[in-house]
């Protein structure tokens, strides 16, 4: 069965292309797609991709009832970002390949809902991709600016606990062993160096949000990320969504516990508390987070225990949660310094996220989780020394 070419831009997503994609994706009996209307959506959230909602109309070769049972009236099409800077970052971090792998290998068996894959293709050499996904737009969404309520927070954490519990310390088994291991030596070095490259521009653009103490912490952390990741890697590991925030979460309209997750481009193998901290710190108002975070983490620990995870105590959960408040700082530095933030809403999303993260790091004494300096003769110590020197050069060059 022939596969359609990967679209270069939204205009290439035509009715004929969609017909070929749905056929190649396993729906050869549909009536021909006669018309398609495209609407770009998620402009404030989809930093790393172009997301289209496509309204589809079909030739009336089938009876309406027969056609409606198998033909999607709408579909979501995801393409790379039109911004060259964001495409380069996506390729460097392997984001497009990761998302395609998730939908191809994991989505159908994962214990958390995601949009059904109608068609997907990935070209490794040029890092080009396309995903055609089920449209779940009828589910409930929550504004990043409002933040999740206490009950929505509980629903989100229950769902991510089920995902984590299902794959807890099974990351060496297929298909998970094909996913990016965030703790690999190469990955740790890359993350530290990318943080290093983006810290100076972050402090230039958003320095007003940093207290003097937080600025010093952010700069100290730049040379200790690798050491901290080594320490975290000694703990549990699971399949992580990696971008577990409100913009990527749809809540069941009936108020039930089910949620659906989109944007799996940062999915990979990492500490389970990364997702938990990322949501609680970034997608919940500071007031709500302070009030419920211990209660929510207690429930998280109970859920994974009921799923068969042994020996993971609340104390261990809380310690990792505090560690990952710093990981949130890392993510925000990559976003603030590395992404093209060219419209007002994107800038507002990043600014609010940065404010919440910096407050949480202070609340949770995240600075106490920064490792001490490693001996120079160790690999981590040599990398730290290089990072300090390189950061000094970057600061000097930027004036």
Image (tube, grey):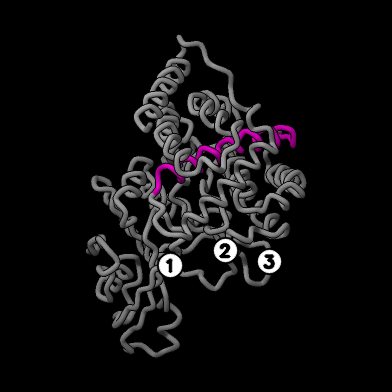
Label 3 or label 1, whichever comes before in sequence order: 1
304, above or below 257, in the image? above
Q: Nearer the viewer, residue 381 or 27?
A: 381
Residue drawn at point x = 32 percent, y = 47 percent: 85
Give the residue at mark 3.
256
Magenta-colored span: 312-339
Q: Nearer the viewer, mark 3 or mark 1?
A: 1
Q: Disc 3 or disc 2, which is closer to the eye?
A: 2
Disc 3 packing (10 Å; few <14; some 14–19; many ≥20): few
Q: What residue is at 51 percent from the left and 11 percent from the top?
A: 375
Give the Cα distance between marks 3 and 2. Answer: 12 Å
Q: Position of residue 124 (x, y in %)?
A: 27, 46
Q: Which of the 4 quarters of the picture holds residue 91? A: top left
Name above or below for residue 322 compared with residue 25: above
Residue lying at 31% horizontally and 86% vertically, measured from the top left: 59
Magenta span: predominant SS is helix
In this view, the residue farthest toward the top is 377
Judge from the rendering whether residue 349 lies leftward or rightward of residue 309; answer left or right. Answer: left
Task: For marks 2 and 1, give the one nearer the viewer.
Answer: 1
> Which circle's residue, 2 or 1, is located before the other in the chain?
1
Are dots 2 and 1 in contact, CB under 8 Å? Answer: no
- The residue wearing badge 2 is 250
Q: Secondary structure at mark 1?
A: strand
Q: Position of residue 90 (x, y in %)?
A: 36, 46
């Amino acid at each position: 069965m022939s596969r359609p070419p990967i679209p270069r831009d939204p205009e290439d997503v035509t009715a004929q292309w969609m017909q070929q994609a749905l056929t190649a994706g396993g729906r050869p009996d549909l009536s021909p797609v006669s018309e398609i209307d495209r609407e770009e959506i998620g402009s404030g959230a989809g930093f790393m991709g172009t997301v289209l909602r496509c309204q589809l109309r079909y030739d009336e070769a089938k009876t309406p009832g027969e056609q409606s049972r198998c033909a999607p009236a709408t579909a979501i099409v995801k393409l790379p970002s039109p911004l060259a800077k964001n495409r380069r970052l996506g390729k460097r971090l392997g984001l497009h390949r990761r998302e395609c792998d998730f939908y191809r290998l994991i989505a159908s068996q994962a214990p958390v809902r995601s949009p059904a894959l109608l068609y997907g293709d990935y070209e490794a050499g040029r890092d080009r991709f396309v995903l055609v996904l089920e449209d779940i737009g009828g589910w409930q969404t929550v504004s990043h600016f409002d933040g999740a309520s206490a009950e929505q927070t509980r629903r989100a954490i229950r769902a991510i606990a089920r995902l984590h519990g299902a794959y807890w310390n099974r990351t060496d088994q297929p298909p998970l062993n094909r996913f990016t291991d965030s703790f690999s030596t190469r990955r740790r070095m890359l993350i530290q160096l990318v943080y290093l490259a983006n810290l100076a521009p972050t402090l230039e653009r958003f320095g007003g949000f940093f207290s003097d103490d937080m600025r010093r912490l952010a700069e100290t952390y730049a040379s200790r990320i690798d050491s901290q990741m080594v320490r975290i890697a000694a703990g549990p590991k699971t399949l992580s969504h990696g971008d577990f925030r409100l913009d990527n979460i749809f809540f069941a309209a009936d108020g039930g516990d089910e949620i659906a997750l989109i944007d799996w481009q940062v999915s990979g193998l990492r500490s389970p508390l990364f997702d938990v901290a990322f949501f609680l710190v970034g997608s919940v108002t500071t007031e709500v987070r302070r009030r419920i975070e211990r209660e929510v983490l207690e429930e998280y620990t109970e859920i994974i225990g009921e799923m068969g995870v042994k020996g993971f105590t609340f104390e261990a959960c809380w310690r990792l949660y505090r560690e990952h408040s710093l990981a949130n700082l890392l993510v925000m530095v990559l976003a603030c310094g590395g992404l093209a933030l060219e419209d007002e809403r994107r800038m507002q999303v990043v600014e609010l996220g940065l404010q919440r993260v910096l407050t949480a790091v202070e609340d949770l004494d995240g600075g106490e989780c920064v490792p001490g300096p490693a001996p120079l003769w160790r690999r981590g110590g040599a990398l730290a020394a290089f990072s300090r020197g390189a950061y000094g050069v970057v600061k000097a060059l930027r004036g």
